[in-house]
Amino acid sequence: MKLTGIGLYTFHEASRLTKIPVRDLRRWLDGYSYRDKAHHSPVSIAPLWQAELASEEMEGISFHDLLEIRFVRAFRQHGVSLQTIRLASRKARELFEMPYPFTSRRFQTDGRTIFTSAMKETGETELLDLVKGQYAFQKIIEPSLYRGIEFDEDDVAKRWYPSPRSKAVMLDPEIAFGKPIVTDCAIRTSTLYDAFVAEGDKNFVARLYEVGVTAVEAAVAFEESLAA
């Protein structure tokens, strides 16, 4: 597999960017096992979907997996089971004919019907009121989940501006393996931040990397937000 254009994040990096614990990320994308005490036998739970880098001998996830798991968390926070999320993801992939349906524009309009069907199929009927009404469904899929995502002509996410109401920093799988960069100069935010920590002078770092001071300020603010 050609890794350029896919993005590559360690589970720790993905956790910092999404604020989702590493343990949850691994359970969702790697699957997990547990011992059934009643039958004294191990039980294996499959990943929610086939991660983009699953066939590679690499620890990490791709750009599209990174965006998709943010939607998984939103449903989990409202009590939707992993079983229902897995089924809804499969149904949406088949309907939309795309591997990452939650981040598709179509999911904003068709996702309610897909999740209603999945909940009925899994017997999770006590949560149906969450998705039966379009307004209730939109409360789960908050606009903030889509805010900052830019789509290509096929409605596939192509880049993400993670900072609210700002495009100073972006993640683009075509640049720097999808790591956060300052939009104006395409330098990794971690590079500028580490230089600032070492030098303690934003103006010096700006001169060192031949960028504007605002680029350094954007990098520092973003990296500090990840640590918060």
Image: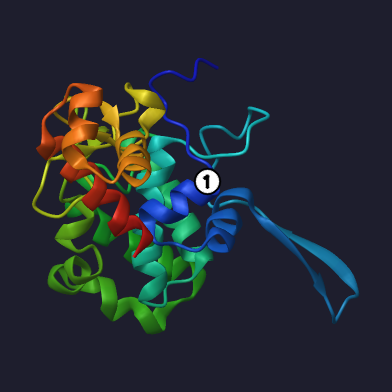
Q: Secondary structure at mark 1?
A: loop
Residue 203 location (% of width, % of height)? 16, 36
Residue 42 location (% of width, % of height)? 84, 64
Rendered residue at 46%/55% (across/down): 15
Rendered residue at 37%/56% (across/down): 18
Query: Which quadrant of the figure contains the C terminus?
Result: bottom left
Horizontal relation, residue 170 to residue 70: left or right: left
Measured along the vertical axis of the image, is residue 96 above or below residue 175?
below
- Residue picked out by circle 1: 49
Measured along the vertical axis of the image, is residue 53 above or below residue 102?
above
Residue placed furthest toward the bottom = 126
- Residue 23 occupies quadrant: bottom right
The amino acid marked with disc number 1 is: Trp
Q: Is residue 103 visible?
A: yes
Colouring scheme applied when the structure was drawn: rainbow
Residue 150 location (% of width, % of height)? 17, 36
**How many residues crowd mark 1 within 10 Å: few (<14), some (14–19), many (20+)?**
many
Measured along the vertical axis of the image, is residue 77 above or below residue 50?
below
